[in-house]
Amino acid sequence: MILVLKNLLSSTDLASMQEALGPQAPWISGSSSAGGQAAAQKNNQQLAQDSELARTLQQRILQAVQNDPLFFSAALPHKLFNPLFNCYGGDANHYGPHIDGAVLHSRQTGERVRTDLSCTVFLNGPTDYDGGELCIHDTYGMQAIKLPAGQAVLYPGTSLHEVRPVTRGKRLASFFWVQSMVRSDEQRRLLFDLDMNLLKLRQQHGETTETTALTGTYHNLLRMWAET
């Protein structure tokens, strides 16, 4: 499932983040954090993970996603890999086709996180740069995604994906991974669809005997499938 999360960050948050992520930020080569397969494809800049700026911005991203009910319903998060930040532009302008590692080790928290889902948060707008589409290959073909600033896309960590070359301007984004309580993408999708339709039924009819029963079904399925 590929899901867009809208209005994740306010215009105030975006303005301060864009200013902080200017040329003066502690950028390093993105390939320094890539695994063997990805390193050959990765040509971008990444904010130094051990910098004070990275730690400050990470907390703002984490707060935003943890306050988003749609994110929680779709991801059912158990662990989050600390958000990272990248910049595409100039000579460091693309990330070729790759699949993220199955389990990543966070230098910051010491945790190992299974990458059930990937999330990219767009920090500047599509008019600020040309190219830079996040291309995700799934069972329905390839989807090219380029979202307004403050929006994010959540997609399966098993997906082959790439960032096309940025040919004008700079593309700023945050990205992180989620280990879900429910490992199966199919099961998460069923739970998400059930949750969203229950929400619509309550909006239309209020709480009824049927919505109460279906809510019980939702939680019984989650109880059956969840790992905590």
Image: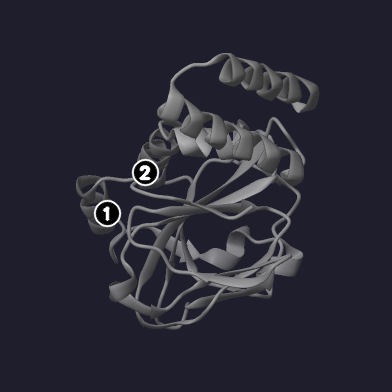
Residue type marked 1: Ala
Q: Position of residue 166 (x, y in %)?
A: 43, 80
Q: Is 165 positioned to the left or the right of 59 in the image? A: right
Label 1 sits on residue: 20
Q: Secondary structure at mark 2?
A: helix
Q: Position of residue 189 (x, y in %)?
A: 67, 43
**How far apart in space, not on screen, are marks 2 and 1 (Cα)?**
9 Å
Toward the right, the furthest residue is 224
Residue at 40% x, 77% y is: 89
Residue type marked 2: Leu
Look at the image and tell me whether residue 108 can be seen. no
**Placement of 32 over or under 180, stated as above or below:** below
Quadrant of the snapshot with the C terminus: top right
**Placement of 85 over or under 75, stated as above or below:** below
Near-viewer residue (123 or 212): 212
Q: Position of residue 34 (x, y in %)?
A: 65, 61
Residue at 76% x, 50% y is: 102
Q: Residues within 10 Å of mark 2 (few under 14, many from 20)?
A: many
Dots 2, 1 in contact, CB < 8 A: yes
User: Of the residues under marks 2 and 1, which one precedes in the sequence?
Assistant: 1
Near-viewer residue (21 or 70): 70
Look at the image and tell me whether residue 62 can be seen. yes
Residue at 60% x, 19% y is: 210
Residue at 38% x, 49% y is: 6
The image quadrant of residue 63 is: top left
